[in-house]
């Protein structure tokens, strides 16, 4: 089961019939995210495989499988910043064990993003998911 915040996005997407409205919603989600401090935008936090500049900086509270995962992220592209917000809704506040069990691509498919993003954006989204999964697999 996806995180409650993500379920709200699914419900909103079901309400919005037009893909232009859905894109606008994703962009607005990105605009609403707190800015990522420039000091965290480093090579270590940069996500490779994205056409845009993307950074993800994890925050893990606790230890082991019960540790709680969160992250801050940013991009120079507004739609990608919105996709980061979608991923934040999917993952933030979950235990690492739950992050590892989340089938992000299946959850994102519920939004229809796989059918409406360009191949470059889809590859970038997979790269962001891969980065998060990698962090959850070895948080130390």
Image (tube, rainbow, N blue to C red):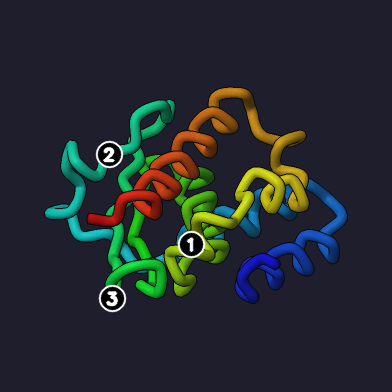
Measured Cα–Cα span from mark 2 to mark 1: 16 Å
Determine which residue is flagged by label 2: 46
- Residue 58 vs residue 92: left or right? left
Residue 105: which quarter of the image? top right
**Residues at badges 2 and 1 in contact (C-beta under 8 Å)?**
no
Instruction: Estimate the x, y position of residue 55 in percent, counting from the top left.
Output: 31, 45
Q: Nearer the viewer, mark 2 or mark 3?
A: 3
Instruction: Estimate the x, y position of residue 137 in percent, counting from the top left.
Output: 39, 50
Q: What element carries label 1?
A: helix
* Residue under the image location 40 percent in, 74 percent down: 66
* Residue under the image location 78 percent in, 68 percent down: 11
* Residue under the image location 34 percent in, 37 percent down: 47
- Say whether disc 2 or disc 3 marks the residue closer to the N-terminus: 2
Measured Cα–Cα span from mark 1 to mark 3: 19 Å
Q: Is mark 2 on a helix, strand or loop?
A: loop
Tag of residue 62:
3
Determine which residue is flagged by label 1: 88
- Say whether disc 2 or disc 1 marks the residue closer to the N-terminus: 2
């Amino acid at each position: 089961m996806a995180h409650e915040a993500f379920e709200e996005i699914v419900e909103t997407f079901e309400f919005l019939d037009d893909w232009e409205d859905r894109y606008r919603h994703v962009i607005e989600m990105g605009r609403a995210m707190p800015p990522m401090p420039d000091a965290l935008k480093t090579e270590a936090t940069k996500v490779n495989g994205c056409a845009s500049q993307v950074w993800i900086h994890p925050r893990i509270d606790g230890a082991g499988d019960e540790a709680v995962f969160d992250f801050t992220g940013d991009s120079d592209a507004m739609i990608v910043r919105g996709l980061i917000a979608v991923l934040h809704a999917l993952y933030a506040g979950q235990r690492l064990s739950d992050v590892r069990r989340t089938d992000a691509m299946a959850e994102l498919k519920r939004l229809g993003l796989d059918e409406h993003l360009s191949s470059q954006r889809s590859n970038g989204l997979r790269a962001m998911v891969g980065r998060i999964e990698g962090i959850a697999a070895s948080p130390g």
